[in-house]
Image: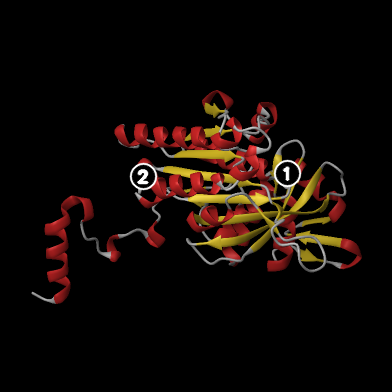
Amino acid sequence: MNLAEDIVSKVDKEFGKRFTTQRVSGLPDCGVAEWVSTGSMFINNVIHRPGIPVGRLTTIWGQSATGKTTLITHILCSVQQQGGLAILMDTEHSYDPERAARIGMVNDDVLLYQSLCLEDAFGVIHRICDVSIANGAPQLIVVALDSHSGTPTKAEVDADLDASKGEIASSSRVTSFNLKRLIGSGMLTKARVTLVFACQPKCDISRQFGFGPPPETYIAKRPIDYHSTLILQLMSMKKLSTGDGISVKVRCRKNKAGPPYGECRIDIMNSDGIQESGSLLELAIEVGTVVVKGGGWYLYGSRKFQRKDWSNLIAEYPSILEELKSDIGSTK
């Protein structure tokens, strides 16, 4: 018996099923077997995967009005389209069912929780995992907490204003303890549950030296960063020229399922969420699928158009978007 076999024999005999030795070759790619699409081809390309990983924590953070809730809504729509269950923990009480329906959400199939405190929110997540495992985990489940930064702990809810000043750190303790139980034990993977946290940054007032504004952080940043498999940062760039949306840069700050540090730009419309047509045109120009001609004209196949006519063109011929995606995919 060689050394490896001896180790396997001793460990399996002492710990049994609780700690059975696995071979790395038997694990799925990067340890994740299932994915839920973000609803955006460009964000999926930045992640270098079909979407966000199942059984892990994905964090979406950015300033207010950068599209965090919109991206979460698209992810919940995607899990519904994949035959899964969408669960939203709306602690900010800001869910807009009408806009969600325009994005593609089936509101009748969404479970909505509005927990009073962080302990209650994590308690619900634990019960969701327990029930899913007990039923054999028949469906993918996305549980989105919107937002973690806006959810107080029980100590903050129960304390008065003066006493709560010393309880802010309780959010980190509660978050760290529960994420260790959910992720470290493999409970999320067994239950086929994906966690998505929305986090809004605040000023780090503990660092007041130097010039300029203090650096940005968010509540319970260290435990959330530590346990996150994927961290996406959303940054608003500018308002669209049409005035009905914003251009947003998405940066992959951490990615344990693929190459990190990728970036992309998406357009978020006021009415129906992420709109990829503008970004798709720029990518098509970059890879040479759409040719730039003189005088501000563009050429795609036999179609000749100007940039200002792009929206009207795709409205008249919706199949152009799928054709472009297919052509761009074949050039990569």
Identify the residue under disc 2: 187
Label 1, residues with CA under 10 Å away: few <14, some 14-19, many ≥20: few
Circle 2 residues within 10 Å: few <14, some 14–19, many ≥20: many
Q: Position of residue 262 (x, y in %)?
A: 62, 65
Q: Residue furthest left?
A: 1
**Quadrant showing the N terminus:** bottom left
Left or right of residue 40, residue 8 in this image: left
User: Which residue is at 84% across, 55% downward?
Assistant: 307
Amino acid on which disc 1 is placed: Tyr
**Which of these two is toward me, 307 or 121?**
121
Q: Residue at x 16, y 69 (%)?
A: 7
Q: 283 left or right of 124?
A: right
Front position in the image: 55 or 299: 55
Can residue 2 be seen? Answer: yes
What is the secondary structure assignment of the residue under circle 2?
A: helix
Instruction: Give x and y (percent) for residue 153.
Output: 56, 38
Residue designated by label 1: 317
